[in-house]
Amino acid sequence: MLKEMGLNNIEELFSDISKKIGIKGLDLPKGLSQQETNQKLRKIAYKNKTFYDMPCFTGGGIKPHYVPSVVKSITSRAEFYTAYTPYQSEASQGFLQSMFEYQSMISELTGMDIANCSLYGGVTALSEAALMCTRVKRKKTFLIPQTISWEKKSVLKNYAKGPEIKVKEISYDKKTGKIDLKELRKHIDEDVSGIYLENPNFFGIFEDDVNEISKIAEDADSLFVVGIDPISGGITKSPGEYGADIVIGEGRAFGNHMDFGGSSLGIFACKKEYLRQMPGRIIGITQDADGRRAFCMALQTREQHIRRGRATSNICTNEGLCALATVSYLSWLGGNGLEELSRINFEKGQKLAREIESIDGFEKMFDSVHFNEFVIKCNKDANNINKKLLNKGIQGGLILDTWYPELENCMLFGISEMHSDNDIGKLVSLLKEASYV
Amino acid sequence: MYRSAVYDEPLINELVASKAEKIKPLNSLSSSIRRKEKINLPNIDETQVVRHFHRLSQMNYGIDSGIYPLGSCTMKYNPKICEEIASWDKFADTNPYQDVSTVQGNLQIMFELEQMLCEITGMDHFTLQPAAGAQGEFSGMLLTRAYHEFNKDFERNEVILPDTSHGTNPASASMAGYKLVEIPSTADGTVDLDTLEKTLSDKTACFMLTNPNTLGIFESEILEISKLVHDAGALLYYDGANMNAIMGKARPGDMGFDIVHLNLHKTFATPHGGGGPGSGPVGVKTKLENFLPIPRICKNKEGYFFDYDSPESIGKIKGHYGNFSVLLKAYVYILMMGGDGLRKSSEIAVLNSNYMKKKLLDSGKYKLPYKELRKHEFVLSCEKLKQEKNIRALDVAKRLLDHGMHPPTIYFPLIVKEALMIEPTESESKEDLDRYVDALIKIANEEPEVVKNAPNNTPVKRVDEVGATKNPVLTWNMI
């Protein structure tokens, strides 16, 4: 090839890199063969313990969920996973139609008119929702419950810097663990662009004053943003039914593995009237030159590759393959399966709470209905209890006092359809042991 | 001739008749939130689900289908071993909240990956948290803000960018609250030093640059640029989307860049997944270390651990520790390539690009505005075809699809009229490059109506994209 180009050596192609900055090579180890790589990674992998080695009862929003083999079989189709963003519609009909179906299913789940085809995760989806409220309402205050994860607050603080959004936290009712409506009313003023509610909230509790909150938002001329745990969607009303304007959530649980927290899948849906202010990619139906149904990216003029500095978001690469996993998963599960899944998670959550509560020295912190996570107050040092559990091969609850000093020795437990009765029995008997010592 | 599979595949909810069914109510829930009807999702057999998505996949084109020289996207082959290892349950079924003693393997991988990326880029420290290139840029802008604010330099509210920059650059800077100042490129297609000098001021927070730039041209005066930027008290940001051109040949850190983001889903061979997940790690020089997101990954005698104690940190940019599954694939890729392998891959990527460029220029059908020597990508103009035959870049792109080849990026960068931005990567054989060149030359010689009516061999004919925006139909309920 060099000869055909009239060149003598490859360095001539790099003559524009001056000697001052050119390097001879990288100080990295010599490359490994595939077999060596496999063996090396196996050694590293065995330093990890998985859910199957060590049942994990940690709450906080991420739990194992069953991934049916169908999902892997579909997402492993290389036509899907080795494709780029579908800029060339004619060669991307398969992925585009899948994303259209994903959007449709998310719209059914959330009760919203429209959904985009993914953001980075539930955490950044909240930030994007706050930015969108600011764009829609041209107001600068965004209200969030105190009971959301510290990570969401931290990320939101970063996204709020540019447009100078004031983020205010609404405290929770210390008895019920739900958002404190009095506090919420107190913080309402004419500058509020949006009110965020998480349902179930970070303590696993169902927020059921939704009609009141929706009314408060409407009266304040602000948008009502609801964050969901999609796993609960089979038994709870969709937020659209109680007046939400934007619905977000972490969709990883639908067909994706935990992957140590990433990849994740940001669900983002809203009412039709806000379409042009929506962040992220949206797929629509159109026609081809013969008048046949076809799919393509719609409303691209909102996006950075067209609008540049004035785009609704900087997002380009999203979480397409996780969305494909989700649409495959929901297709496999169906409406009936989703209801059953939600019910199982709910019932497991109740069962585990009952069993832990029955142990002396452990009590449920809040007097409310919870889903598959809940807060337990221990009469002993919670960190110590977790250490003991860990020694016996169980990962205990999430310690909360780092972020909620008033919740000393409180643990957030989480459970899903994956935890067996055997796992529950083991946890309960170890907690009993810990409570005696 | 290429033929794609074509199905009139219904939407999945058209496969079976379904309507919302009543649900056995869960009375322990308050009626304000209790569901009354099942969610209206179709209930379908597993066989039908598999066939549906299998057929859809056959109407999709990936890098495993064939050449995919999408400029600035680095569509290189994604090694299968990386996919397999990332799917092992020892990685996939770990919870980010697990005690660190039980995920030492994950932490080791992240710790070592940070070190590898430092060596490749010449930076001092890395964060792996950003989920994609654009989020890396946004993080970089937040680091820029934190740096200037820490130095009590509150007046710096502008970010300067060349007119060749990726769309995400201005979008990310704008999201972080910066005013954008775009500067025109020289007749050479590079940064105009005089204009840059005049534009820099005590208001400048940062200059964002891609090197090689989006024309594929290496900014040879980078040390002068770096000096101007730093003399003005601003930071120099490196958009690493084009890193595949210079691995083992030059490093942004040695060029004077203060902040760098990489796209692991480009340069480091992790798949694009039809749009993601990606990963956009950010590297910095030591003066910016304290501002990096938490947690940092550290090591002591007992092993690896997360360090949250970082008072100057910008905090978090994404949940948990980044897209770990993508980080793992990149780690495996770098282990297999080694330092020499990475250098070699950049050399071949640049060789392939310049080879195609020369052959296409020799054909006389396409023009190459700006300087001739390119790195891993080059941008041709179809202006001549447009004038002579009214064939536009879009038409050429669509006609390539009829050859079973993915088109280049089109109409970008904006400073090239009727642009075809071609990045073949190191993955393609000489034969594949020759076939692509031949196809482009053949298309230029075809009758205009043939080209303008393309594609014909794809699952659908030319798609009316304007219609999708004019009358948005975005869910099955809107049909």
Image (cartoon, coloured by chain):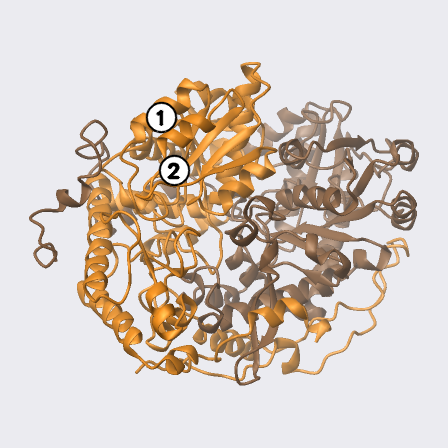
Q: Callout 1: residue from which chain? A: B
Q: Which mark is residue B371?
A: none
- Relative placement, left or right, of A361 versus A212 is left
What's the residue type where badge 1 is placed?
Answer: Ser
Which residue is labeled 1 in the image?
Answer: B226
Quadrant in the picture for the C terminus of chain A: top right
Evaluate whether label 1 is on the same chain as label 2. yes
Rendering coords of residue B59 (x, y %) = 45, 75
Q: Is residue B129 left or right of residue A60?
A: left
Pinpoint the chain carrying mark 2.
B
- Say which colour chain B has: orange
* Of labels 1 and 2, the one closer to you: 1
Position above or below: B26 against B95: below
| Residue B134 at x, y percent in the picture | 50, 43
Mark toward the start of the polypeptide (1 vs 2): 2
Please tell me whether residue B153 is drawn above or below residue A180 in the rendered image: above
Residue B109: numbered disc: 2
- Nearer-the-camera pick, A228 or A404: A228
Return the residue found at the far top: B152
Tell me if mark 2 has few (under 14), some (14-19) or many (20+) residues whose alpha carbon lies within 10 angstroms of its own. Answer: some
Where is residue A253 shown, x and y percent of the image? 61, 54
Look at 28% across and 40% down and name the residue there: B218
Which image quarter is the N terminus of chain A in?
A: bottom left
Q: Residue at x 89, y 42 (%)?
A: A220
Can you tell which quarter of the image residue B438 is in? bottom left
